[in-house]
Image (tube, helix red, strand yellow):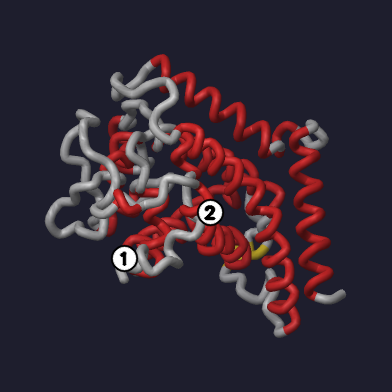
Amino acid sequence: MSSIQLFFDTAIGTSQWVGRNIIFDVPWSQNYFWGLTILSLIVWGLELRFPWRKNQSTFRHDFWLDAFYMYFNFFIFSIVISGVYAVLATHMESIGIDMESLALIDMSNWPAALQLLVFFILLDFLQWLTHLTLHRVNVFWRFHQVHHSIKEMGFAGHLRYHWMENVLYKPLKTFGIMLIGGFEPSQAFIVHFFTITIGHINHSNLKLSYGPLKYVFNNPVMHLYHHARDLPKGMEHGMNYGLTLSLWDYIFGTAYVPEDSGDILLGYKGDEKMPKHFSKQMLHGFSRQSRGE
């Protein structure tokens, strides 16, 4: 099979899978479309019932733009990128790199719960490391600026990010699976839904810090400061990079939560140059203006 045919066959298969999600033709436990939709409505309802920043409107600034990003990044772009990954996987296998060749540990005989825990912790650390890189490497930061152009926090802002971040983040899941031999990828939906839930909550207009568990799990109070426009001395590239777990930031000294009023300016210096429309934001990072030229 040619690479072009493989690309289109995989993309068509992924689009059919998305369609089956929409018409309830997959098990509820693995229905990503309605799982995401129902989760979003629940968190949005909590935002409206228990708002942290009470001056935010029901449909906050860029609400509909963020909602579109949510479905675009989760489903539409996945159709395209799935074909690319299928071609890359085939070429990797042709040179002897497969799911078993990179395995560091074999978990095939471990309890399922322990497999999921190890996978979750490994994946979260890899995502933390990638997130830190997005802030500290200028070429990546230009793409990540789309996410940091959020001016009011809300659940849908979780999935407002440039399509290039998909290119960086999504291979991590496959890489994580390759490092732990014997893990059954079909179980990964449990971790996936858990991390999506935490991500929605972290970007929501809810005041939660989880008490002592704040040193383990990221939370809305901590993540708000990740989106702060004014950064403290010594943290000019950012802080609080954790996605689901906060412990990496406490371990590596990138945690910063000075107070919890929620009354801070969001964004980044120069965010007024960010295009307002989705189509132009998708080109941001490639333009001469975004490169500061």
Left or right, residue 146 beside residue 194: left
Going by the numbered disc 2, the residue's amino acid type is: Val
Q: Which residue is mark 1?
A: 136
Numbered circle sitting on residue 118:
2
Q: CA distance from mark 1 to mark 2?
A: 27 Å
Q: Quadrant of the C terminus?
A: bottom left
Residue 292 image point, x, y percent: 30, 67
Residue 280 image point, x, y percent: 48, 54
Say which of 168 and 163 sits in front: 163
Q: Residue furthest right?
A: 1
Residue 192 image point, x, y percent: 58, 44
Say which of 147 and 101 sits in front: 147
In what element is the residue under mark 2?
Answer: helix
Residue 285 falls in which quadrant of the image? Answer: bottom left
Question: Is residue 123 at all visible to an observer of this figure?
Answer: no
Residue 128 image point, x, y percent: 40, 56
Closer mark to the observer between disc 1 and disc 2: 1
Going by the numbered disc 1, the residue's amino acid type is: Arg
Please report the residue visible at 48 percent of the width from the left and 19 percent of the height from the top: 45
Left or right, residue 142 beside residue 86: left
Q: Residues within 10 Å of mark 2 (few under 14, many from 20)?
A: some
